[in-house]
Amino acid sequence: MYSKRKILVCALVAGLLFTFAACKKNNSVAVTIVAKSEVAINDYSDFTVSIQDLRTEKTTEYKLNSEGKCEVMLDKASYTISISGKVGGDSYYGVVENRSITQKETLEIKLTNTVTQQDGLIFKQLFFNGETNSGQMMHPDQYIILYNNTDKVVYADGITFGTSMHSTPIGEDVFTKELPDYVVAQQFYAIPGDGTQYPVQPGGQIVIARTAIDHHKNYENAVDLSGADFEIYEPDMPSDFGTDIDNPDVPNLKIIFTYYGIFNMHPRGFQSHFLFRPDKDWKTFLAENRFEFKDNKGQTQFTHKVPTALIMDGIETGMEGMVKTKALPPSVDKGMSKVTGCHRQEVITRKELSGKKLQDTNNSTEDCVRTKGQTSFPKKASKSGGMFNMQAPKPIDKVYTEAECNELWIGSGKNNFSGR
């Protein structure tokens, strides 16, 4: 009797193991990845295939063969699959995002040359994440740092800060269809000047504050931005989002266009940021690059797009576990810099190299690091010779709940506000 029971148990175990193995085997499919380039490439063997499982965010790398092919076994799931490599002095990149793999298939990935316009100023630091002050989730001291990464003087006059309309937590939409030739934007804020008014020396930087005051006086985890070089002042800020304060000793950026009626850097990085300089006067540029679309209610809305060739620098941003489709083309940023959540005091900072240079390979995954804690920029001597000491009332800032931060503001209608 014991022997029969033992045999029966062993048979059941063996059957379960066989069933598990069969299920596991059936869950995997063969995928052939093929690189396609408009420019003839004789040997692809130095090109790398990166496959990211969107469930686990784990990335596995493979090599193409000389003909530009790679065969892999993948579990049935959703992936972002990219190919990158160099031929001589040219870099090539291609990506397929949020691709559901459910059966055996051949996946062709188009490669593009990732050379883009360079004009000296790049992002050194982005702080959009915000912090928790006295238990309240808010972000009063957002700021941007631009850096002259060349060996010559660069004039900042006219350089414009733009933000993508597309949000990285959602799939392809009407905005991503314009990639890679254009980036559809939700706002333009430009540095003023006549062309030679704001020189930036090699290794010099420009600090742009959302509001150039000492925020630490009112909020324990905020910093002093009263010494910023520029600020974003909005006298017509909607009352639902607080009141703005103008520091008279800090020049204001020019508000060229804002779809939502207010400056926006999403605390979870859902929209991505870039720098460009228009190639013609603003009236003509806006008219030629007007972009119409339908919002969630089916109503016609408009914003503007930017030719990718004009973009000087950009950093793709997002939040861990909530990325589906990039907002910037590979020629601007092949990678992405992510935060872990909103209001964590996380800063995106570009890596430093020797000789006052910052790393800039158009891949923010490699070029940037995520650090904790903002940088303070205390007040400077005012133009009148004294020290600036603004006697301003405490600003009223929007306070967020965790539920509000969990919402996916996707920029498809003004009822889905994604701002401050």
Image: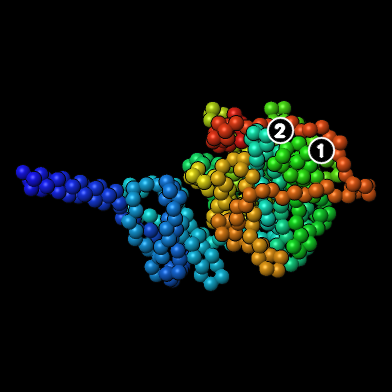
Q: Secondary structure at mark 1?
A: loop
Q: What residue do we see at 60% from left, 46% from top?
A: 272
Colour logic: rainbow
Question: What type is the residue that disc 2 sits on?
Answer: Asp
Question: What type is the residue that disc 1 sits on?
Answer: Asp
Where does residue 294 sit, x and y in percent of width and height? 55, 33
> From this viewpoint, which residue is outermost toward the right?
385
Q: What residue do we see at 63% from left, 49% from top?
A: 372
Residue 392: image quadrant is top right
The reply to whether callout 1 and callout 2 are in contact (CB within 8 Å) is no
Which is nearer the eye, 411 or 385? 385
- Say the numbered circle drawn on residue 346: none
Asked if residue 177 shows in the view, the reply is: no
Q: Of the residues under marks 1 and 2, which one precedes in the sequence?
A: 1
Where does residue 267 sit, x and y in percent of width and height? 62, 41
Q: What residue do we see at 50% from left, 40% from top?
A: 170
Label 2: few (<14), some (14–19) or many (≥20) C-alpha neighbours in 10 Å: some
Which is nearer the eye, 215 or 281? 215
Above-or-below relation of 239 to 23: above
> From this viewpoint, which residue is outermost toward the left?
1
Residue beneath label 1, please?
246
Q: Secondary structure at mark 2?
A: loop
Asked if residue 14 shows in the view, the reply is: yes
Where does residue 396 sit, x and y in percent of width and height? 74, 31
Q: Quadrant of the N terminus?
A: top left
Residue beneath label 2, please?
397
Is 333 left, or right, of 64 in this rendering?
A: right
Above-or-below relation of 169 to 311: above
What is the distance, in whole Å, between disc 1 and disc 2 at their CAs? 15 Å
Above-or-below relation of 75 to 397: below
